[in-house]
Amino acid sequence: MDTPVTDQSYVVRYGVSRIVGEFSARGLGPLARGTTVIIRSDRGHEWGTVLSTATEQSRTYLGTAEEHGRIIRLTNAQDEIEHDQSIAFEKEAFVGGQNAIRERNLQMQLIDIERVFGGERLIFYYLAEDRVDFRELVKALAKQFQTRIEMRQIGIRDEAKLLADYGDCGQPVCCNTFLREMPPVSMKMAKLQKATLDPSKISGRCGRLKCCLRYEYDTYEEHRRDLPPIGATVVTKVGTGRIIGQELLARKLMIAYEGQRMVMTDEKDIVTVVSNKPGKSPPQMAADRDDAADSSDSPRREHRPQGEPRNEDRPRGDSNRRGGRGPRSGPPRSEGSGDSRDMPNPDRPE
């Protein structure tokens, strides 16, 4: 009795940039994870590796329910030989591409080369700060390798995705395994998570901030919004104090009470929030400071006849005062012009 022909879809990874997509298969039977197959994509015939059976969960991860192509057949011994030949050819083409770029003095850096299985096209991945006119280069490469040439400009993070292997954590880099998109990461995320601000420790293989700084940022941000801010005045079972620190994941607060006593307090032990305004001290603490200022140990103010201005009360425009412009030197700053150093750069460590 013949086995019925069934249609099944699989998630397949292919290409040097490890593209992941859904591919249909017909009459091949169930395919296990890690099975190597020959697929037909929009770029031509390619070598691929089966990751899993296509499900609604995998389609949600991929962000689309459309198929990228179909699985033609399983690989055989001849395909293995041709695959090894393609890898050797890519190494030779890389050297030839570098020489061609150097001869034309083009401001671009060749990163990697991919030969689509079957030799239908040759893809050159490069870095460049500005636009590059590579029309003559493409003509020369097409004549040299007798195939279709495709030039693809990539970013610094894409370079790590192509070439990097392991990160500081000892695991394969995220951009080379499961990340489909690489959203921007800012220093604000590192500061909120109380990570070290040493650029050498929070930078990945690409030289930019590590992608993993974003993984728990939403949770930290949610807890930060739920907890009273630093500087707020709260009342707990112990007394009234001011928040001077937060442990966001543990949802605990460091509170300074009267007498400079600091206690780590759980969120549930807070009875009420007197004031959410940062920097406002509890009434009793303010009263203690006023009493200390009026004590005999504090310096007394100098009594002057009423109407006699002190030096610091004189207007800045007073001609008897040196400097003319007052104590501040340099041109005045306009209102609302903040210091640009406080603005986080999305990808560059401070």
Image (spheres, rainbow, N blue to C red):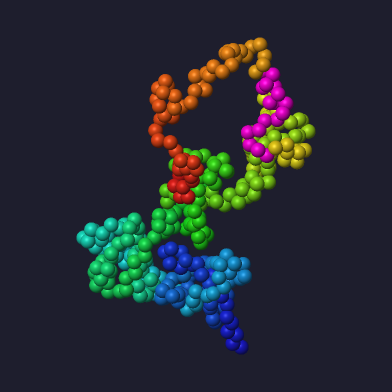
Quarter of the image for residue 75 reads bottom left
**Which residue appears at 30% of the width and 62% of the height?**
132
Q: Residue furthest left?
A: 103
**Which residue appears at 39% of the width and 33% of the height?**
330
- Looking at the picture, does residue 328 appear above or below residue 207? above
- Residue 11 in the image: state x and y as whole percent: 54, 70
Residue 165 within the magenta-colored segment of the rendering: no
- Residue 210 in the image: state x and y as whole percent: 49, 49
Q: Nearer the viewer, residue 159 or 265?
A: 265
- Residue 166 in the image: state x and y as whole percent: 46, 51
State whether residue 139 appears in this view: yes
Q: Nearer the viewer, residue 98 or 78?
A: 98
Total of numbered circles in the picture? 0
* Span highlighted in magenta in the image: 276-292
- Residue 146 in the image: state x and y as whole percent: 27, 74
- Looking at the picture, does residue 301 appear above or below residue 135? above
Residue 286 within the magenta-colored segment of the rendering: yes
Q: Nearer the viewer, residue 276 or 35?
A: 276
Quadrant in which the N terminus is drawn = bottom right
**Which residue appears at 57% of the width and 13% of the height?**
304
Judged left or right of residue 32, residue 77 is: left
Quarter of the image for residue 136 reads bottom left
State whether residue 32 appears in this view: no
